[in-house]
Amino acid sequence: MKTKTTLLILSFFLTFGLLQAQTQREVRSLGAFNAVKVSNAIKVELVKGSENKAELTVSGIELGKVETSIVDETLEIRLARGNFRNHNVEVKITYKDIQGIEALTSARVIAKSPIEASEAYLFASTSAYLEAEVEADVLNIEAATNAKIFVTGKVEKLGLRAFTNAEIDGQNLRANQVEVMANTAATVYFRTTGIIEGSAATAAKIYYKGNPKEINVKTSTGGTISRH
């Protein structure tokens, strides 16, 4: 009897483990939004289309534990509260129009379609990765705490802020006017033939390509700016 009970318990846990490991898929219709915010190590691909929807592919976690909610016109993609290990969550977002992307806590977000807006923003923090092409009049980018942002495109005014070992790679991002702030071992790259203003401090490095008309960047505590 004891052996039979033990086998039943083992069978239950094996079945539960297999269910957890299975890949599950779901398509969700979404309301209107103009920005996307991703966290909890979720991988997201953004594609422009004729409707707003999310296509989820998950393993090691229940579909219901992956939240896709719209708060103040921002689509937030995150995990519900709880301890989740050995899981994988991939989401393909089809959108009509967006102007901002945020990647947090080890999320990985790649925009497959160019972001076109009069004013756009990109933000990444805490070991997240964000990749996008942007065409805008104004683009503001911020990266913090080991995050990396890879960005290409063309903008008129560019605002860059990088902190605490973060990196903004805009070597193929052209801007006419750049305002940049970098500190605490952050690294920033961009291209311009216009004006550069800002500061670099605490071992931060600013690299630029092109022949800027004017450079007004204050450096302190090992911060530097140089042509790349």
Image (tube, rainbow, N blue to C red):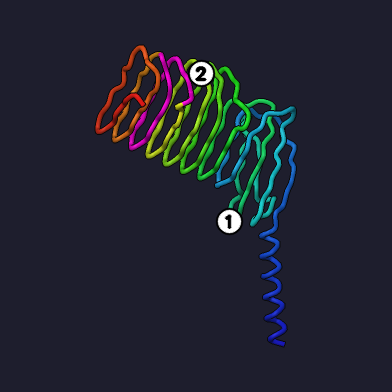
In magenta stretch: residue 149? no
Q: Is residue 3 left or right of residue 194?
A: right
Q: Secondary structure at mark 2?
A: strand
Q: Is residue 85 left or right of residue 57?
A: left
Q: Is residue 45 left or right of residue 107?
A: right
Quadrant where the N terminus lies?
A: bottom right
What is the distance, in whole Å, between disc 1 and disc 2 at their CAs? 40 Å
Magenta segment, principal secondary structure?
Answer: strand
- Residue 45: image location, x then y, percent: 63, 38
Pick the residue in front: 101 or 204: 204
Amino acid type at image mark 2: Val
Using a 10 Å C-alpha cutoff, classify the residue at mark 1 as few (fewer than 14 neighbours), some (14 to 19) or many (20 or more).
few
Q: Which residue is mark 2?
A: 155
- In this view, the residue farthest toward the left is 221
Amino acid type at image mark 1: Phe
Q: Quadrant of residue 43?
A: top right
Using a 10 Å C-alpha cutoff, classify the residue at mark 2 as few (fewer than 14 neighbours), some (14 to 19) or many (20 or more).
many
User: Which residues fall within the magenta stretch?
Assistant: 172-193
